[in-house]
Amino acid sequence: MRTTTEQSNQGKVPLLLERTWNRGRRVVANPPMLLSILLLGVFVYLIIVPLISLVHSSVTLHSRDTLRVLGGKVGELTNFYFQRVFASNISEVLFYQPLLNTLLISFSMSALAISIGCILAWVVVRTDIPFKKLFASAAVVPFILPSWTISLAWMTIFKNRTVGGSAGILEYFGVQLPDWISYGPVPIIICMALHYYPFTYLLVGSALRDFDTRLEEAALVLGAKQSIIFRRVILAVVAPAILSSFILTISRGIGSFSTPVFLGNPINYRVLSTRMYASLQTGSPGDAYVIAIVMILLAILLMFLSNKVLGKRKSFVTITGKAPKPQLFKLKKLRIPVTIAVGLFLFCVIVVPLFVLAADTFMRVPGVYSLDNFTLHYWIGESTPGLVDGRPGILRNPSTWAALWNSVKLGISASALCGFFGILIGYTVVRMRGTRISTVLDQLSFIPYLIPSIAFGAIYLSLFAVRRGPIPSLYGSFLLLILATMAKNFPFAAKAGSSAMMQLGHEVEEAGIIAGAGWFTRMRRLILPLQRSGLLSAVMLPFISAMRELSMVVILTTPGTQLLTTLTFQYSDYGFLHMSNAVVLLLVVIIVIMQFILQKITGSDLSEGLGG
Amino acid sequence: MKNTRKGTLIGLTVILLIMALGSVIQAAEEDWDAIIAAAQQEGSLTVYDLSSRMGIAAELFEEKYGIKVEWSKMNDVEISDRVAREHEAGVKGADVIITEDAAILIAQLLPQGYVVNYVPPTHVDLIPVEYQNPLVYRHQPRIIGYNNEVYSELPIKNIWDLTTPAWRGKFMMRDPQLTSTNLAWFAEIIEHADLMAAEYERHFGEPIELTTPNAGWEFIKRLANNRPIIFSSDTDVSEAVGARGQTDPPIGLYVISKHREIEEKNLALEAAYGLEPIMGYLYPTFLVMTANSHSPNAAKLFISFLLDEDGMSAWAKDMGNFSTNPTIPPHEDDPLGGTAAWAQVTFPLNAQTTIKYYADLFDFWLLHAR
């Protein structure tokens, strides 16, 4: 292509026209090229335009604020929101305090999650602890559960009477709890760490597993002290895994919504995400959009910094062939206590929360834990006035089934689209490798990952709330949920698609070309069948994530498009914690079944191999 | 008006004829039987409401007319936001909304044309004119209540007591940011600043020291600083106040109709009768149809139904809800016997007052309630 350009530089106008024509023909005749232009269009529409719309919405006056900005007209340009958020008498409430809280929670939570993950990974991978298989698969369960499961359980156990309502189990048995245990940063940090430690556990675990113990032995032979071996050998090899888990964890922390909303809101402890949600809720979308912009910038900054740090690190290539079976650390006397400790920990983060939630759903009067208070009402009861406003039990309640059906529908349609686009993106990026458009596509597909879920929801709300020229208003439609869920999951789909395609040599397609197969035939008969497993993982991950997503959809759902996740949120908002718990349990059952199917189909296990 | 002109000048008779003709045409448009028939053709309608008892009214309506009511419970802000968005989007959404957010309704939803005020011909002569624009279908008192298992009599004498250290962290209310009526109540308190100042002096024996423009703002600031406990529903508040077996129960602000649950939930609740200068507020609930209604006839029929005894029965069967239809008497258990009496012991809300203070008040609360 370079040579054609140079030649045509010497040409005249007719030549230039011819060149354009030729180029156009080449594009049409070149399916990957055509495809990449189409995909570029999709990305611009689903990612770039919404981002622009977010910025636009943050500088235009919204309807309710005509009561604030006197004489202002809806839709006119204004710096009112930026001023309100950054430099007004309520900036501290709207922005600075929530920002500090967000940073405090994200960093502390990451530190705690990483410590738990590292310890657990080391114990499971490198010691002679028994029940390895069981521990290895149990350790990832908290991440499979919806992220607010543990917070709901925490509330059920540790809630005190400060904010009124029925108290938790501990208070029922006469234990007085101070506020800082019941609500606010401490429980938020703990609950989030317990949800996110599996990131570290998986990454560090696999680094430790691949770690050649002969390096350790070599250091020992060279006379290094244990502390030096740990610092200079083990830590140096594991450090990149820790760093990547730090990035994964903290970026989730910044956007995290459900845990702070359950455990922070009762005492008015706000982080950026919950403050943003409150602003949307209380009819100040302008403030919310400004906060969303800050959240996105914060996430991008973090990613940028971590890339700097990660990029600078020396990488250790340990080419020794297959590492021998690692020498397991003998726990000796500590073997039983450590086993009990790990078992107890996993019991406390998996079994206890689920059990507590389940128990709570059988109590007729919330907070009274006695047998004569037992009821199945919240599961199968008929509508009784005075109990949860006359709602029937969740299994009898049409709104549960409607929400379940919506969740499944959303999961299936978003993940099918994701799989479709994932393969197309993968195909295009790999086939066009080295060209600028391939790089741009690759990077564009990554953007949704940088944007915290709730901010992503806000972006879509800002774009589709009203009709803008050719872009229809999709507010309240199911299509909006599908589009947002699909776009949010683009990064995973694209990754799965391109890594699958990467392994497929060009030869297969060339063979097809020689055999005279057109592009569509090649796709249908060659590429897609060969990519079945890649397609599957590009589909299943978005499906599961759609089933348990809350923070993005919470601002996009309307009464007609209620999902299971938003239903739990709504029940807890009404103060029907037991209804909310029951729906969460239903959700857990579904997710666990889905996860099981996923593992059976793909034959892969998240924790595979870590058990030794 | 037409009657008085009858039998005057011929020229006027012509005008009258034209007017009469006009009104005949209007009456033809408002042929109620035709509306009922058309409504049944439409088959269903969507209602956004704040009250969970809409479920009962919806069933009664379906029973009577065979028209299905799909209703959603949401708060004021959600209702007005959704209606505005649905209108902008031109999608099928709510047909009827029931809102307590008078300021937004009058300053925005009506003038922007998102909703239209409709008084059905069945009730236009019945409902007092002051409740017709926009149409109010019921009133409710939201009152301060206490736990009468622990307190044999009202534990506070004056509303200013809520700002004292003794009640720090022990006053419960719905979130004023989400509950437009609570914010509107604050607006009334500011409007009655002189009364608030006088009450302060009478109660504490010394004039109030202001850090804000007047005693109304000062009350709100002190109330906010006194760490009130914020809930999202009246149910939560009334249960937390009235739960038995407490030693140090809170005081709460909730709709008095929650007293209907005293027996079912075994609560110990009493309203703060005699609290100076007021024991709460009296607020209107508005009933309007959306401009873009996809089932306009069903919407009209439903509005008429809620003004009737049938529709109102969902609320009127318990104490604490007053229809604006004078043929529906207050509940026999009502301790005061009607809205006029309640207006004496509460601040009745006024939309213009809310609009006046809304912008400042919202941020003021956000700033001080931490």
Image: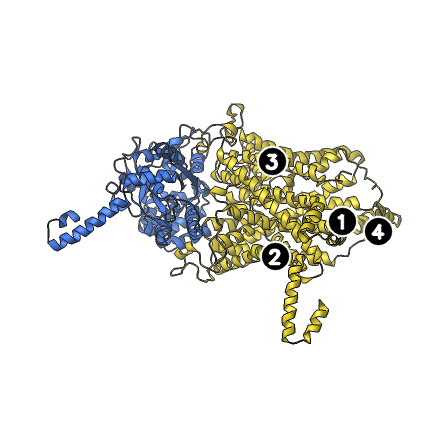
Chain colours: A yellow, B blue
CA gap, disc 3 to disc 4? 43 Å
Which quarter of the image is occupied by the C terminus of chain A?
top right
Task: Name the residue furthest front.
Answer: A516
Work out whether disc 2 and disc 4 sit on a shared chain. yes
Secondary-structure class at tag 4 = loop
Which numbered disc flags the more N-terminal residue, 4 or 1? 1
- Residue A238: mark in rendering: 1
A481 w.r.t. A362: above or below: below
Q: Nearer the viewer, residue A409 or A79?
A: A409
Residue appearing at x 51%, y 35% in the figure: A400
CA gap, disc 3 to disc 1? 35 Å
- Tag 4 residue: A319
Residue appearing at x 35%, y 45% in the figure: B288
Secondary-structure class at tag 2 = helix
Q: Nearer the viewer, mark 4 or mark 1?
A: 4
CA gap, disc 1 to disc 2? 41 Å
Work out whether disc 3 and disc 1 sit on a shared chain. yes
Residue B117 appears in view? yes
Which quarter of the image is occupied by the N terminus of chain A?
bottom right
Task: Name the residue furthest right.
Answer: A221
Which numbered disc flags the more N-terminal residue, 2 or 3? 2
Work out whether disc 4 and disc 1 sit on a shared chain. yes
Q: Type of residue at label 2?
A: Leu
Task: Say few, some or many: other residues with alpha carbon within 10 Å of mark 1 (under 14 / 14 to 19 / 20 or more).
Answer: some
